[in-house]
Amino acid sequence: MAAGSRTTTRTPLVLGVLAAVLYSNFLIDWVLRGFEGMGEVVSELESPGEPNSALLRVTDVVCAVLVVALLPWVRRVLPPGLWRELFVWLTVLFAVGAAAAAIVPEPCGPGIACDAPHQVIESAVHGYASVVSDVALFVGMFAVLIGTRRVGPRWFRMIAWWLLWIGGVISSLLFGYYHEHPDPWWAVGASQRVHILSISVWIFCLGLLASRGSPTHQPEDR
């Protein structure tokens, strides 16, 4: 393989790494806060007035742009057909929803009541955008599992399967439970962060898959 081709295949990996790191930007907030705030809901850390709100929201939007930029490389290596196109457009929807949730943030930070009519509307818009974004990503992940069921690669399918259950099902159910029953107080934040980290791992795996170069449905070029 020529040097130019190797350079090209590094691009999706770089995009995947950067997007994965930025999607878990709560780690940046955690460091900047002096290693505090890991028990809080991430959306509330992006509320206006919070110390790192602007940074978190900007990195969310940048992450969304990077994910969309990564998709042409990922699409190229997936088997053609309905499942591939469904994955691509659902992932675009994930990125759009994530950007929308950053542009319209949760209006109030931790421990602050949001009762004003405009705050209720903003909270609803943010919440719906977040839910649509997350559901789209995990349904797209399921589409990839079906689309690659006969061709692999095995490592990619295995990771996708675990992420779908841990990040898409278990952590989401735990977050919903602890959001209504916050005991212990840190559990809601912890379960949400498992969910977020699962998405970051998936984004990284997409970049890694695309960087391998050869389509999953064709023999590797010699």
Image (cartoon, rainbow, N blue to C red):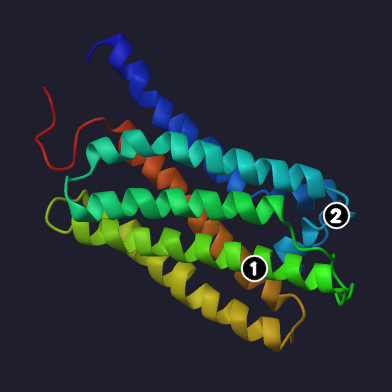
Q: Residue 57 versus residue 124: which sits nearer the camera?
A: 124
Q: Residue at x 53, y 73 (%)?
A: 171
Label 1 CA crowd tier, 10 Å (few <14, some 14–19, many 20+): some
Quadrant holding the N terminus:
top left
Name the foreground residue: 149 vs 222.
Answer: 149
Marks 1 and 2 in Cβ contact (< 8 Å): no
The amino acid sitting under disc 2 is Pro
Q: Image check: 80 left or right of 10? A: left
Across and down, in percent, residue 81 comes to 17, 50
State the image coordinates of residue 2 (x, y, percent, origin top left).
Answer: 25, 11
Mark 2: give few (<14), some (14-19) or many (20+) Cα within 10 Å.
some
Q: Nearer the viewer, residue 91 or 56?
A: 91
Q: Earlier in the sequence, mark 1 or mark 2?
A: 2
Instruction: Answer left or right for 205 relative to 199.
Output: left
- Where does the image place residue 185, in percent across and percent down from the top left? 77, 80
Residue 66 drawn at (x, y percent): 51, 36
Residue 148 can be seen in this image:
no
Q: Circle 1 — which element?
A: helix
Q: Residue furthest front?
A: 117
Name above or below for residue 14 compared with residue 1. Answer: below
**Residue, disc 2:** 48
For image coordinates 81% across by 54% down, the residue present is 35
Element at label 2 = loop
- Apparent side of residue 210 relative to residue 173 in the rendered image (left or right): left
Read off the residue under disc 1.
127
Q: Toward the viewer: 129 or 5? A: 129
Q: Is residue 19 above or below residue 178?
A: above
